Amino acid sequence: MAARSTFAALCALVLLIGCAEAEVANVSENTSGIPMPPIKPPIPGTTVSGGNSGGVCGDPRLTGKRIPPVTGRLAACGIQDAVRITHVAGIKLSTPARLNCQTARTFADWLTGPANARARSRLGSPINRVNVFASFACRSRNSQRGARLSEHSFGRAIDIGGVTLASGREISVLNDWGNGSAGAWLREVWRDACGPFKTVLGPESDRFHRNHFHFDTAQRRSTFCR
């Protein structure tokens, strides 16, 4: 009986040692011997810029952060899936743009696609900076009294006044539309925006857009370009 009791005690000791080793195996390696704290998930709203983070809106081209839902002075204004974009594929925005995810991704498609490709081929240099005139703004169309709310009121629009190339050359809608290679580039990329965006307005549309492009992702099937 004594031999059996001794054997049982030894078995229990072996099991205890095995459990202790299993506990040690589950602790991250460190030189102090103190268990490492668990890795916490990212805090909502923190900056992300591609890589393993996936980028803002799940798009690695978009650098910035998610922000709380945006509201305006009018109850109808606002952005539910609001983001604040500072760069697109490394291209700096002169002013961070508050948009919804759909508009941010559509803008990235245009900027990193035809706009930058045509800048390289026609102007000999890629885009380094975009001059953003406006993004979210709770207001009527063209700020006219009695007009319907602008798509800017919903985070579905962005206004672009021009770009700066990596070479340092500045292209302005106001000064270069219709002039030389820069004017040709502006007209081409204005045309390229028609389709991806639902509304595309430029200097020939009206007096309100003589110095910038207006791009928006209005919720309608047809596309309006002028």
Image: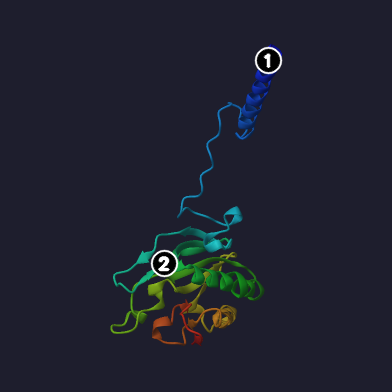
Q: What element carries label 1?
A: helix
Identify the residue at horizontal 63%, vertical 25% (top origin). Answer: 16
Q: Where on the picture, by quarter, is residue 31?
A: top right
Pointer 1: residues within 10 angstroms few (<14), some, or many (20+)? few
x, y percent for residue 29: 63, 32
x, y percent for residue 178: 53, 84
Tell me the amino acid under the disc marked 2: Gln
Identify the residue at horizontal 57%, vertical 54% (top origin). Answer: 53
22, above or below 76, in the image: above
- Closest to the observer, 217 or 86: 217
175, above or below 104, in the image: below
Residue to which mark 2 is pinned: 80
Do the numbered discs 2 and 1 sit on residues whose CB atoms are within 8 Å?
Answer: no
Tell me the tag on residue 6: 1
On screen, residue 130 versus residue 74, left or right, reads: right
x, y percent for residue 17: 65, 24
x, y percent for residue 49: 55, 56
Pointer 2: residues within 10 angstroms few (<14), some, or many (20+)? some
Residue 224 appears anywhere in the view: yes
- Closest to the observer, 176 or 160: 160
113, above or below 53, in the image: below
Identify the residue at horizontal 68%, vertical 12% (top origin). Answer: 2
Residue 170 appears anywhere in the view: no
Tell me the amino acid under the disc marked 1: Thr
On screen, residue 121 versus residue 45, left or right, reads: right
Q: Earlier in the sequence, mark 2 or mark 1?
A: 1
- Closest to the observer, 23 or 221: 23
Q: What element carries label 2?
A: loop
